[in-house]
Structures are given as C-alpha cells and as structure tokens.
Image: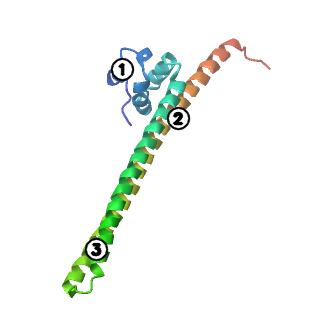
Amino acid sequence: MSRSYTEVQVLKKLDIPDFRHLTKDKVIAFATMIPRMNPEVAKKALEQFPNFASTSLEVMREYRGILEDAMKDERESTQTCYDMYNRVMSALEKILDEDDLSFEEKTYILNQMKEVADEVSKKDCEKANNRMKMIGIAGSVAAAVVAILGSAIGVNLTSRQNSLEGDIEPIDK
C-alpha cells in the first residue's frame, strides 16, 4: 500500500501556505501528487481552488505549445544532421568513382560509408526514442490532469449528493 500524503506534506512539497495559493505553475505538480494524497486532502484542495479545471486546461495548452516547439526544433536539428550525412556520403561516392583507387582504399571508403549509414540509423532510433519520450511525458501530464478533473467532478457530485440527501425525506411504503 502506498503512502498517503497529508495536507501539511502536500503544502510543504508545493511550497505554499494553503491551497488558495495554488498557482498555475504548481498545478501539474499538484496533479501528479493526487494519486498519493489522502482523499480528504484532495477534496479540501479542490474546494479551495475552484478554477482548477480552467487553469489545468490553460496549462495543458501551454504545455502543448512547448512540445510543438520542441518537436519543431528537433526536426530542424535532425534535418541539419541528415544534410551533413548526405554531404559526407556524396563526397565518399565521388572518391569511390575514381578509377585509380586500390582495393584497400575502396574497402576503406566503403567502410566509411557504412559508418555514416550506421550513424543515420542511430539518429533515426534517437529521433524515435525522443518522440516516444515526449509522447509519454505529454500523456502522463494529460492523464494526471484528467484524473484530477475526474476527482474534482467526483467531489462536486459527492457534495451535491450529500446536500440533496439532507433535503429529501425517505418514502415509507
């Protein structure tokens, strides 16, 4: 069974005096802590931060922009790298076309071309891994925010249900 954070521990980790001081910058940190929080602490926090849903969506939009910028930068960097590999390969191909090369020289150039091809393959794997990491991070953040929003809705429904139960008298048959 995992440890459940108390209100004091959550406030200390967020470095805020109370949940009314929960800022946009701290929403994601708060969201990731929810699964390990005491349910009463989570309810109290969400009651004191009524704009959690809209703030979370705003943070997600900003986060999406950051991810898009990072992916654009990665594409540009990767394209520069591929262009450089292509120039090296073209130069090696030109040298290889020369008729006066010995067998050893041709073998050396072919090995160099293989090394460049291996580097391109590594770059492709690196690119795929980076993309998967970004998708994983974005997914984790989105899941945390959705979980919190779900908790918030659950808290609101529970609060309404409890208040309605006090207003409705049982029917005797």
The numbered mark at residue 92 is 3
Instruction: Give amino acid for label 1.
Output: Leu
**Residue furthest to the right:** 173
**Residue drawn at 63 percent across, 15 percent down:** 163
| Quadrant in which the N terminus appears | top left
How many other residues sit within 10 Å of disc 1, few (<14), some (14-19) or many (≥20)?
A: some
Q: In percent of the image, x 49 and y 38: which residue is there?
A: 142
Left or right, 101 with respect to 48, comes to left
Disc on the earlier residue, 2 or 1: 1
Q: Secondary structure at mark 1?
A: helix
In the rendered image, the vertical position of residue 111 relative to residue 173, given as above or below = below
Q: Mark 3 vs mark 2: give the one in front.
A: 3
Q: Secondary structure at mark 3?
A: helix
Q: What is the three-letter code of the residue carrying label 2? A: Val
Of the residues under marks 3 and 1, which one precedes in the sequence?
Answer: 1
Task: List the single residue furthest toward the top.
Answer: 167
- Callout in the foreground (3, 1): 3
The number of discs equals 3
Residue type, label 3: Leu
Q: Which residue is mark 1?
A: 11
Give the distance between the C-alpha atoms of the residues marked 3 and 1, in whole angstroms: 62 Å
Which residue is identified by label 2? 146
For the C terminus, the image quarter is: top right
Q: Assign a secondary structure to mark 2.
A: helix
User: Residues under labels 2 and 1: Cα distance?
Assistant: 21 Å
Query: How far separated are the C-alphas under marks 3 and 2?
Result: 53 Å
Q: In front here: 148 or 127?
A: 127
Name the residue: 66% across, 13% down. 166
Closer-to-camera residue (38/79): 79
| Residue 104 horizontal side relative to residue 35, left or right | left
Q: Viewed as shown, does residue 115 lie left or right of 23? A: left
